[in-house]
Amino acid sequence: KAGVTQTPRYLIKTRGQQVTLSCSPISGHRSVSWYQQTPGQGLQFLFEYFSETQRNKGNFPGRFSGRQFSNSRSEMNVSTLELGDSALYLCASTRQRGAYEQYFGPGTRLTVT
Amino acid sequence: GESVGLHLPTLSVQEGDNSIINCAYSNSASDYFIWYKQESGKGPQFIIDIRSNMDKRQGQRVTVLLNKTVKHLSLQIAATQPGDSAVYFCAENIGGANSKLTFGKGITLSVRP
């Protein structure tokens, strides 16, 4: 069974630009969560999507948004990029919402210059 | 062991020895716990999980212990191998219909040949 895939793997953007990252969950998994990983703050929860609806949101500004499609694939968007948005963005999928095994993709490394 | 900032605590063990990685979790309402392993350039890899109604769970070469009284979680790795060298994270979930994971800062395991 294929794992969680994320595209692109690496991205370099300039301050003020916007970016869209994509995540394809494991087949049959319907919940997708996004996390930001930085050396200073570690892994922080961004949001969770299930059945095309955002179910839970972390403490990030409104510049961070996402969506989920009917095939459970998810995208996250960051607008008006800041230097501090440089991070590894990870998505994780699980079969259903709640306390179940979550599997992570390899992440998208975003560098903002 | 917890840490802040860029410098994660490091546990150095001899190849073949047993490793014990500790984690203090923050929320007494947490109901589900996961250990992840993250190698350089990769996303977190699921190792083992445990629910709050259990004290111990064993996998292949790994054992997770949960002490709810003191909010402490540990991961024991038997016969540690060079391939076990990585950063290890514990994560907690409050259960219910909530997939959000709250991660610890991480501990680096270094295996000496």
Image (cartoon, coloured by chain):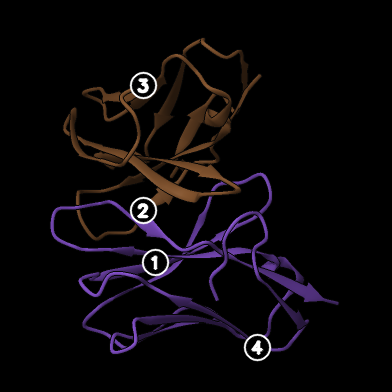
Chain colours: A brown, B purple
Q: Are marks 3 and 1 on the same chain?
A: no
- Looking at the rendered structure, the kind of residue marked 4 is Asn
Decide if residue B1 is on the left or right side of residue A72: right
Which chain's residue wears label 1?
A: B
Badge 1 or badge 4: first in the primary sequence: 4
Element marked by disc 1: strand
Label 1: how many Cα within 10 Å (few below 14, some 14–19, many 20+) = many
Label 2: how many Cα within 10 Å (few below 14, some 14–19, many 20+) = many
The residue mark sitting in front, 3 or 1, is 3
Decide if residue A99 is on the left or right side of residue B67: left
The dot on residue A102 is 2
Q: Are marks 4 and 2 on the same chain?
A: no
Image position of A8 with respect to B80: above or below: above
Residue on which the image places disc 1: B34
Marks 3 and 4 close (CB-CB < 8 Å):
no
Q: Position of residue A95 (x, y in %)?
A: 26, 48
The dot on residue B91 is none
Give residue B90's quadrant in the image: bottom left
Q: Nearer the viewer, residue A30 or A79?
A: A79
Q: Position of residue B88 (x, y in %)?
A: 57, 65
Residue on which the image places disc 3: A63
Give residue A58's quadrant in the image: top left
